[in-house]
Amino acid sequence: MLHILLMILKIIGIIAAVILGLIILAVLVVIFAPLKYTLDAKCQGTLETLNVKIRFSWLFHLISGYCYYEEKETDWQMRIAWKKINIKEDEEAEPKSQKTKQENDEIRSEKVSEEEEIKPAKQVCDDEEPKEEITVGEKEGNEPKRHNRSKVKRKKRSFLVNIIFKIKSFFEKIKYTITKIYDNIKLIGEKKDKIIEFLEHEAHRGAFSKIKQETVRLIRFLKPKELKGRVHFGFDDPYVTGKVLAGLSILYPFYGNHIIIEPDFSERVLEGDIHVKGKLRGIHEVIIFFHILFNKDIRTTYKHIKNFKL
């Protein structure tokens, strides 16, 4: 009896070890398997000539797909093992559903027409004469005119009252907004010393520098293997062009000298070409996550932020 029990426990332990090993293997595959991607974009001056092609694959092409945007048309496909998911299948499914709807509508209309034929037609009596309507003016003389004049006067007064009320409410809102802004500025000025003390804390400064360091490392990991291109852009409003250029300058450490940016402040234009090819691995994000999670200064700063009150 004891021998059978030990055999059952041994089998259960082997099954549990196999399941645990498969789980660990799956996690390692997900973390270490690279997601390969390529991106090619071209434009010859306008948005109508914009062509974008994106391809990706993961787990030795077990999962792969593409997405194209060309001549104002979009085409995409995703393959998971042997199963393909394509936009064309969705487009073919829609006309079939529309056809079935049209057939159902035709059947319903035929049924309604048959029911109308069965019903007897109603006879309309031509001998009946329409009843004469007696207006209020014929009974009471000129009273309706006076009544209408009084209504017009009341409408004018109510209209003026509404305008005055709206003007007063508008100025009251402006006054309330100004006082609120002034109170907030005053409150920030009073709490300025507390905020500066919080930011200059040794643990908080260490946490901020650690987050900055890990962010730079993440950008380095995400940087593609191949990156080259040229972009010449411009908008009707030079202000918008400057804003977009400022946003692109933030990403300069990412693309560096590999992509040439040429802003045009005089006219609206979009032309150029970009080629990007790289790999993404989940292990990089996992390493950065654990570096942040087990950092003492970051944990201390998080607790202080939760309990911080002005």
Image (tube, rainbow, N blue to C red):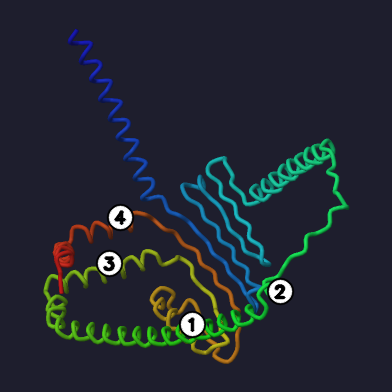
Q: Is residue 112 left or right of residue 171?
A: right
Which element type, helix, strand or loop, lies under badge 4? helix
Distance from Cα at disc 4 to Cα at disc 2: 90 Å
| Residue located beneath label 4 in the image | 286
Nearest to N terminus: mark 3 or mark 1: 1
Q: Kindly report which numbered mark, 2 or 1, lies closer to the viewer in this rendering.
A: 2
Residue 182 x %, y %: 24, 87
Nearest to N terminus: mark 3 or mark 4: 3
Distance from Cα at disc 3 to Cα at disc 1: 65 Å
Q: Are marks 2 and 1 in contact (CB under 8 Å)?
A: no
Q: Is residue 284 left or right of residue 243?
A: left
Q: Kindly report which numbered mark, 4 or 1, lies closer to the viewer in this rendering.
A: 1
Residue 133, image quadrant? bottom right
Query: Circle 3: is it few (<14), some (14-19), or many (20+) Cα within 10 Å?
Result: some
Q: Which mark identifies residue 214? A: 3
Q: Which mark identifies residue 138? A: 2
Q: Is residue 2 left or right of residue 95?
A: left
Q: Residue at x 66, y 63 (%)?
A: 73
Residue 242 x %, y %: 47, 87
| Residue located beneath label 1 in the image | 158
Nearest to N terminus: mark 3 or mark 2: 2
Near-viewer residue (142 or 247): 142
Q: Are marks 4 and 1 in contact (CB under 8 Å)?
A: no
Q: Residue at x 63, y 57 (%)?
A: 75
Distance from Cα at disc 4 to Cα at disc 1: 68 Å
